[in-house]
């Protein structure tokens, strides 16, 4: 009987299986370490038999038999939603969900995965995320934003590459570095001043696009003046040294 088990596979087939694995990961049927290992094997698979073996023990409608059934503290196989108290895979209490919730701007023209990356970076700079905080679980982001799991995984991999996050097998992705430059009291004061400026801008008749354009122009002028000041300062220092 003819079998295609030993037929060589194309890149498209490898990508398709990686996408299926991402769906299982988002559904809670694979932990981070298992997912990473299977995707690595999928991308290096030589035959269709190799690819099928990566999905053989995964159910389309439920979790795998064994320890995976206990994920989410013995509740549903997918675990509890982000932001809701639940349990770790070991059965102990899990803290509150992630401090941030992702939002997308379809009109921005920015790729979806980069929007997620930028929102994490902004939250870090503003002190909304701190060391040890957990990012929303992939399956929760997929469910709330209706996007492909691979998109979320790509964003989280980018953050990990930048050294901002680290994955913990069976638990999720956690903040391991910060971008915060000033303390929360200072940020609160600056935010209050900025809100006052926005109110004045709205009173002058500017819409959101006008506010962004004005702020961007002022920020550019600020950087140019600061750069020019440093250049002139360096030149003056050089002249003084020459005279000496």
Image (spheres, rainbow, N blue to C red):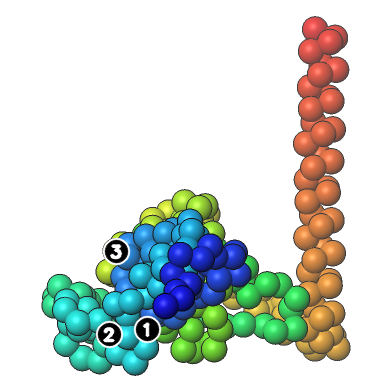
Image quarter where the N terminus lies is: bottom left
Q: Is residue 78 left or right of residue 105?
A: left
Identify the residue position indicated by label 1 in the image: 27
Q: Is residue 57 above or below residue 35?
A: below
In the picture shown, does residue 129 fall above or below 176?
below
In the picture of the structure, the residue carrying the numbered disc 2 is 63
Residue linked to disc 3: 169
How many numbered discs, if any?
3
Can the viewer see residue 43?
yes
Residue 35 image position (x, y, % from top left): 37, 67
Q: Earlier in the sequence, mark 3 or mark 2?
A: 2
* Image quarter (top left, top right, bottom left or bottom right) of the C terminus: top right
Q: CA distance from mark 1 to mark 2?
A: 8 Å
Of residues 209 and 41, the one drawn nearer to the viewer in this rendering: 41
Find out whether the residues at labels 1 and 2 contact each other: C-beta distance under 8 Å.
yes
Expressed as whole percent of the image width and height from the top left, the position of residue 207 reads 81, 86
172, 179: nearer the viewer? 172
Q: Residues within 10 Å of mark 1 (few under 14, many from 20)?
A: many
**Label 1: which secondary element:** loop
**Discs 3, 1 touching: Cβ within 8 Å:** no
Taking the image as shown, residue 217 lies to the left or right of residue 53, namely right
Q: Between label 3 and label 1, give the one nearer the viewer.
A: 1
> Nearer the viewer's eye, disc 1 or disc 2?
2
Q: Nearer the viewer, residue 36 or 239?
A: 36
Going 36% across and 70% down the picture, which residue do you hit? Answer: 53
x and y percent of residue 208 in the render?
A: 78, 84
What element does badge 2 sit on?
A: loop
- What number is the disc on residue 12? none
Disc 3 versus disc 1: distance between alpha carbons? Answer: 15 Å
Residue at the front extreme, as displayed:
1
> Residue 187 placed where, x, y %?
53, 66
């Amino acid at each position: 009987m003819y079998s295609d088990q030993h037929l060589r596979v194309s890149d498209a087939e490898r990508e398709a299986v990686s996408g299926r694995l991402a769906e299982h990961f988002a559904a809670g049927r694979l932990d981070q370490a298992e997912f990473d290992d299977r995707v690595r094997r999928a991308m290096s698979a030589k035959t269709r038999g190799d690819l099928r073996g990566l999905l053989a023990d995964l159910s389309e409608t439920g979790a795998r038999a064994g320890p995976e059934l206990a994920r989410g503290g013995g509740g549903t196989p997918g675990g509890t939603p982000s932001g809701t108290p639940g349990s770790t895979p070991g059965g102990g209490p899990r803290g509150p969900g992630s401090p941030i919730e992702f939002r997308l701007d379809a009109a921005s023209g920015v790729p979806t995965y980069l929007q997620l990356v930028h929102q994490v970076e902004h939250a870090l700079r503003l002190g909304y995320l701190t060391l040890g905080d957990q990012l929303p679980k992939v399956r929760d982001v997929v469910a709330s934003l209706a996007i492909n799991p691979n998109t979320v995984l790509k964003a989280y991999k980018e953050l990990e590459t930048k050294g901002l996050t680290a994955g913990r097998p069976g638990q999720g992705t956690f903040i391991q570095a910060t971008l915060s430059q000033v303390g929360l009291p200072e940020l609160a004061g600056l935010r209050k001043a900025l809100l006052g400026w926005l109110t004045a801008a709205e009173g002058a008749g500017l819409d959101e696009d006008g506010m962004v354009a004005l702020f961007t122009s002022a920020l550019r002028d600020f950087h140019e003046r600061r750069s020019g000041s440093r250049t002139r300062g360096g030149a003056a220092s050089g002249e003084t040294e020459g005279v000496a």
